[in-house]
Image (cartoon, rainbow, N blue to C red):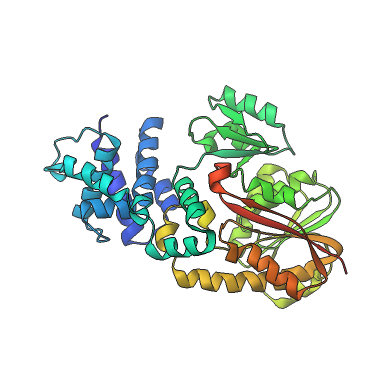
Amino acid sequence: MRLHRNLVFTVIDSIKLIFNEGEYADKVVQKALKRDARWGARDRKFVAETIYEMVRWKRLYNEIAGTKSHYSTENVWKNFAVFAVLKGYNLPDWNQLQGVPERRIKGKFDEFQKTRVFKESIPDWLDELAVKELGEATWEKEITALNKQADVVLRTNTLKTTKVSLQKKLAEEGIETVFIDGYTNALKLVERANVFRTNCFTEGLFEVQDASSQLVAEFLEVKPGMRVIDTCAGAGGKTLHLASLMENKGQIIATDIYESKLKKLKIRTRRAGAFNITTKVIDTSKVMKKMKNTADRVLIDAPCSGIGVLKRNPDSKWKLQPEFIDNIKKTQAEILENYSQLVKNGGQLVYATCSILPSENQNQVANFLENHPEFEFIKENKVSAFKSGFDGFYMALLKRVK
């Protein structure tokens, strides 16, 4: 396999932005892919996947290259050399790749397979926390699954089309997909492609949404005509799913503390043809008081550590800090306490996270129920990245009974 100079230089520049400037990997990749309009699909794939691979295996590559976490241009090239050797690329005769110790790199790689924090490329504190919460055997399987590249999964917008029809139309545009057993409206891409350039996307026939994430809206058991509040809606992936499940009938109130995110949701609602969604910025306590005891259904897609989505956000391994997880658990408890008040008697609530840690999930629900006898536990779904092959998620369905 051959390396191309302009592609590799783009990767090097991108890694420096991520680790020296603190930019998010997904945003850096987006910018990198716009660097040269002449690039074909294979070029774009190399740039995106190599950036993510170097971020995902940061610690392992640092240890092999002896660069630690100092991201000078020279050290980034050393890490890239590790990547290239391990992936089987033929090293070109460039100044930056002179004297690469290929045999030593392969030997070090084999040596580091004996230690999980190096083998799986994770911080010590995260490894210790996950072992404590999940047990060593479970964490071993989960982190191995979370270090794999994420599949591209689409959710059919049933307000406009069917899964079968969407699959056919995507095939006409050169994108092959397969159904996923157990996921009602999901299509998985056979090969990665830029689906945002398709006519199907422009027409609002689908949203890009991981298969596990697609389970959350269905878990809420909404029906057409209900009043539903999505309390941490963000840019509204699950809000749009709720609208399709409700067949555009009833009312969905999408709330968030960030107005900028809700503006993005408004753009997406127009493309999706979702007409039963209104947005509200939670900027004062008055907004909450007006909605108290009014909702048939409430969705709390709570902020969390995001450990369940490491395969699509590998840089969060390095951005996360122990104190963030301590603080986010307090925030989750407060959100559950406050937004549960919006559920009317007989109504239902889903608490969900994209974490696999019990302290963020079932423990939060147990603590809430202990202090709120007006709610009863209906069911929960602990989605394992290892077992499902998709993101790790948690969701619990509660019902207000008095």
Q: Can you give x and y, in whole percent of width and height, for residue 320 in the image? A: 44, 64
Using residue 100 as the reference point, say whether residue 129 is left or right of it: right
Whether residue 155 is visible, yes or no, is: yes
Q: Can you give x and y, in whole percent of width and height, for residue 100 in the image? A: 15, 43
Query: Which quadrant of the figure contains the N terminus?
Result: top left
**Residue at image location 58% in from the left, 29% down from the top:** 177
Whether residue 80 is visible, yes or no, is: no
Rendered position, 382 above or below 166: below
Q: Quadrant of residue 158?
A: top right
- 109 or 278: nearer the viewer: 109
**Residue at image location 21% in from the left, 32% down from the top:** 90
Using residue 237 as the reference point, say whether residue 243 is left or right of it: right
Q: Can you give x and y, in whole percent of width and height, for residue 219 in the image? A: 73, 50
Query: Which quadrant of the figure contains the C terminus?
Result: bottom right
Rendered position, 38 above or below 310: above
Using residue 7 as the reference point, say whether residue 231 is left or right of it: right
Q: Can you give x and y, in whole percent of width and height, for residue 72 in the image? A: 22, 58
